[in-house]
Amino acid sequence: MPSSTSPAVSLSGKRILLIISGGIAAYKSLDLIRRLRERGASVRPVMTAGAQAFVTPLAVGALSADKVFTELFSREDEQDVGHIRLARECDLVLVAPATANIMAKMAQGMTDDLASTILLATDRPVLLAPAMNPKMWSHPATRRNRDTLAGDGIAFVGPGLGEMAESGERGEGRMAEPLQIVAAVESCLEGSQPLAAPTTLPLSGRHAIVTSGPTHEPIDPVRYIANRSSGRQGHAIAAALARLGANVTLVSGPVTIADPAGVTVVPVQTAVEMRDAVLAALPADAAVMVAAVADWRVADVSGGKIKKAPGEAPPPLQLTENPDILKTVGHHAERPRIVVGFAAETDDPVANGRLKLARKGADIIVANDVSAGSGVAGGVMGGTRNRVTIIGRDGEETWPELDKEAVADRLAALIASRLA
Ligand code: C5P
C-alpha cells in the first residue's frame, strides 16, 4: 500500500469503549477519538463528572458519533444499554486520560460512578493512558496502585516526560500522544502486550523526525528522476522509535510499502517538499535522515510532456542542486539533540561516512555499502537486510548483517540511550 495521509484501517470493526476521566489531557481525547475512528474503530464514550469539566459531552458525542454515557443510575441509559452491557459489548476498554483517582478506585475495586463500575464489571482487556501531575505520578500511593493494576493484567501506555499544561512543571505524567495510544490499542488487540508493564517507555514524550524513501524530481508532467530506495530501512526506524514511545513524524518520499503503525506520515514527492516538511516538524529531540534524497533536480521542469521529434537530438537536462536536508537540520537553530544521517556509498563507506559526520553536523552517521559486491544478499537498496557501521564522534562500530528491522531496533535503542 502506498504511503498516504489516510491511515490504514487497522482497527476495522473494533469496538472501543473509551472512558474519559477528569484531567486537562481530556482535550487530547477528542483527537484520539478521531484517530481511532479513521482507522475503522467505533468509539463509545463514557465520561466521568470530572471529565465533563474539561470537555463537553456534546463535543465528545459529535466526534464519536455515538451517545455519551455519564450516569450510573440513569433510568434511560440502564433501560437502553445498562452498565454491564457497556462493560462487555466492546473489544477493549480504554481509559484516556486515566487520573490518579480512577487508578486508585480501580486498584481498590471501588464502584461509585459509571466509569469505575464498568471497569470492575468488564471482562475485556483494559488499557490505561495515565495523565497527572509528576508529583502525583511518582507518589508511592500511585506507584502501589499502578503495580497492583499491572498485576491484575491491566495494560499501560505512558505517561511520558513533558511539560504539564496547567502548571508548566516538567516531569513524568504527561498523557501519551493520541497516535501512541492508537499503537498501544493495536498491540493490545493483536494479543501482544508489549505495553502491559507499567514502565514508562524510554522515548515517551520525545519527538523524532525520520525521512525515508526516495524523492521524485520531475522532468515533465510524466517523467521524473528517482532512485532504488524502497523506504524499508527508514520506515522500520520510524516504527522502532514509535515502539519505544516516541512521537514520530515520518516524512516519506513515494514508496509502495505500508505506513508504520502509530506514526504520523507526511507524504512528499521532491527534495524541496521533504525539506519543508522536515523544517515544519521541528522542534524535535531526534532527527534520523534515512531518505535517499536526489542530489539534483531539473532546473526548468517542463509544463508539458517533452516530445521526441524525428531526427532531433535528445533534449539536454539542466540540473540544479537540491537542498541538503541533513546538513540544514544539523546546523539549524532548533537542531535536535541527536541528528543521525545515513551514508550509502559504493566506495569506502567508513571513510566517506566520517567526512560526512563533520560536514553535515551529524552526531551519528550510519554507513552502509550499497555496492553490488557488498556481500549483503539481494543488495542493500530495495533489499531487506543491511550491514552497517555506526560512526560517532568518538569512534565506530560495525554491526553484523541484520534484517532492516533489527538494524532499526538497535539504532532506536542507541538513540534512546543518548537521549536518556
Ligand atoms: O551526501 P549524501 O547524499 O551521501 O548523504 C546522505 C545522508 O544525507 C542521508 O542521511 C540522507 O538522508 C541525507 N541527505 C539529505 N538531503 C540531501 C542529500 C542527502 O538529507 N539532499
Image: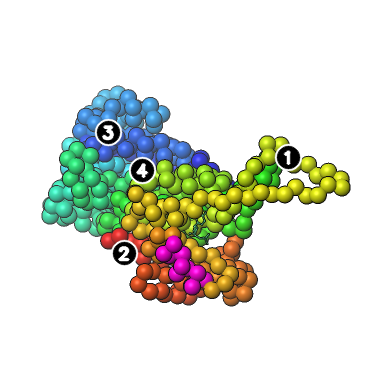
Disc 1/disc 4 C-alpha distance (Å): 44 Å
Disc 1/disc 2 C-alpha distance (Å): 51 Å
User: Looking at the figure, which quarter contains the C terminus?
Assistant: bottom left
Q: Amino acid at mark 4?
A: Pro
- Answer left or right for 75 relative to 137: right
Find residue 44 and report its image quarter: top left
Is the CB of the residue bearing disc 4 within 8 angstroms of ligand 1? no
N-terminal label among 4 and 2: 4
Q: Of circles 1 and 4, which is in front?
A: 1
Q: Which residue is the site of mark 3?
A: 47
Read off the magenta span: 349-359
Disc 3/disc 4 C-alpha distance (Å): 18 Å
Name above or below for residue 200 compared with residue 123. below
Find residue 227 and report its image quarter: bottom right
Q: Which residue is the site of mark 2?
A: 417
Say whether residue 274 is visible.
yes
- Number of labels in the image equals 4
Q: Which mark is residue 178?
A: 4
Q: Secondary structure at mark 1?
A: loop
Residue at 41% x, 74% y is 396
Task: Inspect the magenta stretch and tell me whether residue 353 lies in it.
Answer: yes
Q: Which residue is the site of mark 1?
A: 305
Q: Main secondary structure of the magenta part?
A: helix
Q: Of circles 3 and 2, which is in front?
A: 2
Q: Amino acid at mark 2?
A: Ser
